Amino acid sequence: MSLKQLFSEFLKMPYFKNHAASSGHVHNFANHEAAITDLMIKHGYSRFTPSKKLHKKNYNSDEFLSEMPDKSFIEQPFGTHSSPDFFIKSETNIIPLEAKSSETASHPTYNSGGIKQGFYYIFCSKKTNSTTIYRGEDIITIEQQQLIDEHIKDEKIRATLLNEKLKNIDVNSRGISFYPRPMIYQSGGGTFTNYFSHKNKERDEERAIYSL
């Protein structure tokens, strides 16, 4: 099965919790990622274990996962607390895939990880008991990401200066300091944030599939 066909199968998935001990549907998978793994194996993709630990700094190099066979995947390639959740190898490239799930909302939560250009996302919601797929660049533009990156950089500089001032007046010797944590979210109501009724839903699903 090609990656295009596999991603079409992803679209048929119901809701699964991302972190719970049982699924949100009638299947017996540990979580959303386990359900994705099972579907890949079912359609002829196999687990691959790299010969050595992977590092993000090597991600864009030509040698990155050059030994990875076609129609294989890696789970948690950079660890359980780092994106992406999967790398999937096709005949032509390696796809970074991130699993998102929500029990209460019709949009995912990105938090400080942000929305990654070049990443493919699978998002399911309990509210609709369905799944959608999309690419990071169809949610956030490069220009928007650049503005956010610049702001984060400026905020870190300001935080460093603030913490020096806090340290100088720490008469209680409590080590009070401030840590700026970037939080990427979406707002504006369902017209903007509902991934299942959004005007670009079908467009973004098709872009994801046909770009593979």
Image (spheres, rainbow, N blue to C red):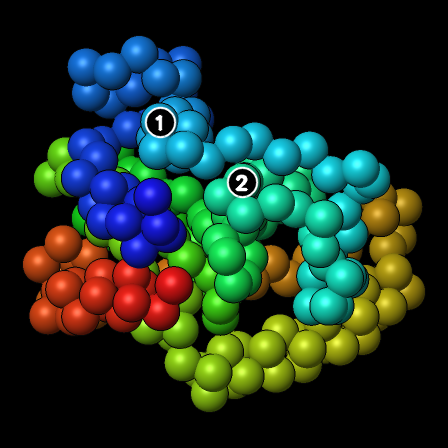
Horizontal side of residue 46 vs 190, given as left or right: right
Question: Which residue carries the number 1 mark?
Answer: 42
Image marks 2 and 1: residues in contact by CB distance under 8 Å: no
* Residue 21 x/y as whole percent: 40, 14
Horizontal side of residue 92 vs 43, given as left or right: right
* Residue 29 x/y as whole percent: 35, 17
Q: Secondary structure at mark 1?
A: helix
Question: Which residue carries the number 2 mark?
Answer: 72
**Mark 1 surroundings: few (<14), some (14-19) or many (≥20) residues within 10 A:** few
Vertical arrangement, residue 66 with respect to residue 142, above or below: above
Residue 80, numbered label: none
Vertical arrangement, residue 59 with respect to residue 200, above or below: above
Q: Dividing the picture into quarters, in which one does residue 33 lie?
A: top left
Horizontal side of residue 157 vs 30, given as left or right: right
Nearer to us in this view, 1 or 18 = 1
Marks 2 and 1, Cα distance to the nearest angstrom?
Answer: 12 Å
Q: How many numbered circles are shown?
A: 2
Q: Secondary structure at mark 2?
A: strand
Nearer to us in this view, 125 or 170 = 125
* Residue 130 x/y as whole percent: 16, 39
Residue 32, visible in the rendered structure: no
Q: Dividing the picture into quarters, in which one does residue 205 lie?
A: bottom left
Q: Residue at x 72, y 48 (%)?
A: 67
**Amino acid residing under circle 1:** Lys
Vertical arrangement, residue 23 with respect to residue 197, above or below: above
**Amino acid residing under circle 2:** Ser
Nearer to us in this view, 30 or 41 = 41
